[in-house]
C-alpha cells in the first residue's frame, strides 16, 4: 500500500522551491532537497520564490497539493514594505489592485490587509535587510485565498510600496509560528 507523506518546512531566504535544478543558468542555487531527506515524488505545494521565505508544505499526494492551492484555503504573508504605508494604500490593497499575470491585466482580491507587528508573532525583532539610513519601512499582514505568480510583490508595488521582505506565515490552520529557518517536520496529515 502506498501512503502519502507530508512535510512542513520553514524555507529560508535564498532557496528555490524545487528539488531538481534543471536550468544551466542556476547552477549554484540552493534547493529544498538540501534541507532533508524526502521521498521520490515529493512536491512543493505553492511555491515561494528564491527571495521569499517562510511556511512551505511538501507532499507526495497530488490531490492534497491541488486542494491547498485552491481558493478555499487562506495563505497569510508578513510583508515588509519600503516606506510608512498609508491608510489609503491599505484600503486600495483590500479593495483590489490591477496587476499583470501572464502579461494580462488581473484584479487582485485580498481577503485581509492590516498592519503587522513582527515581534508579537515571532517573539523577536526582524533581521535587518537594510540599514535605517535607507529610510523607514512598514510590516503588513496580507491574507489571500488566491495565489498568482509574485502576487504580493506586484500588489504592494502597485500601491507605491515595494516589498522588501516576504514571509509566508500561515496556510489554512497551519502556522509558521516559531519554527526555525530550515526546519523540516514530517506530519501524518495536513489539516486545514
Image (cartoon, rainbow, N blue to C red):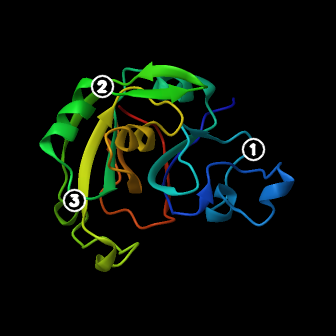
Question: Residue at horizontal 81%, vertical 62%?
Answer: 27
Residue at the spot of label 1: 40
| Residue 87 x/y as whole percent | 13, 42
Q: Is residue 186 left or right of residue 170?
A: right
User: Mark 1 falls on what kind of element?
Assistant: loop
- Mark toward the viewer: 2 or 3: 2
Residue at the spot of label 2: 96
Disc 1 residue crowd, few under 14, some 14–19, many 20+, Cα 10 Å? few
Question: Residue at horizontal 32%, vertical 23%?
Answer: 109
User: Mark 3 falls on what kind of element?
Assistant: helix
Q: Which is more N-terminal, label 3 or label 1?
A: 1
- Mark toward the viewer: 2 or 1: 2
Q: Which mark is residue 121?
A: 3
Q: Is residue 19 above or below residue 113?
A: below
The answer to whether mark 2 and mark 1 are in CB contact below 8 A is no
Whole-angstrom CA distance, mark 2 to mark 1, is 39 Å
**Of the pair 155 and 16, the residue shown nearer to us:** 155
Q: Is residue 136 left or right of residue 149?
A: left
Whole-angstrom CA distance, mark 2 to mark 3, is 26 Å
Q: Which is more N-terminal, label 3 or label 2?
A: 2
Disc 2 residue crowd, few under 14, some 14–19, many 20+, Cα 10 Å? some
| Residue 21 x/y as whole percent | 79, 52
**Of the pair 149 and 182, the residue shown nearer to us:** 149
User: Mark 2 falls on what kind of element?
Assistant: loop
Q: Is residue 77 above or below residue 121?
A: above
Q: Is residue 92 left or right of residue 48?
A: left
Q: Residue furthest right?
A: 24
Amino acid at each position: 500500500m502506498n501512503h502519502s507523506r507530508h512535510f512542513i518546512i520553514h524555507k529560508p531566504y535564498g532557496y528555490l522551491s524545487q528539488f531538481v535544478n534543471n536550468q544551466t543558468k542556476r547552477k549554484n542555487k540552493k534547493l529544498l532537497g538540501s534541507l532533508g531527506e524526502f521521498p521520490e515524488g515529493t512536491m512543493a505545494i505553492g511555491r515561494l520564490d528564491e527571495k521569499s521565505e517562510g511556511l512551505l508544505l511538501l507532499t507526495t499526494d497530488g490531490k492534497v497539493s491541488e486542494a491547498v492551492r485552491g481558493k478555499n484555503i487562506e495563505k497569510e504573508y508578513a510583508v515588509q514594505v519600503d516606506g510608512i504605508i498609508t491608510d489609503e494604500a491599505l484600503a486600495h490593497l483590500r479593495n483590489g489592485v490591477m496587476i499583470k499575470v501572464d502579461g494580462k491585466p488581473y484584479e487582485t482580491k485580498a481577503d485581509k490587509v492590516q498592519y503587522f507587528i513582527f515581534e508579537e508573532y515571532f517573539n523577536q525583532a526582524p533581521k535587518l535587510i537594510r540599514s535605517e539610513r535607507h529610510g523607514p519601512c512598514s510590516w503588513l499582514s496580507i491574507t489571500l485565498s488566491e495565489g498568482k505568480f509574485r502576487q504580493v510583490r506586484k500588489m504592494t508595488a502597485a500601491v507605491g510600496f515595494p516589498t522588501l521582505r516576504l514571509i509566508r506565515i500561515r496556510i489554512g490552520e497551519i502556522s509558521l509560528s516559531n519554527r526555525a529557518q530550515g526546519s523540516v517536520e514530517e506530519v501524518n496529515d495536513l489539516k486545514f
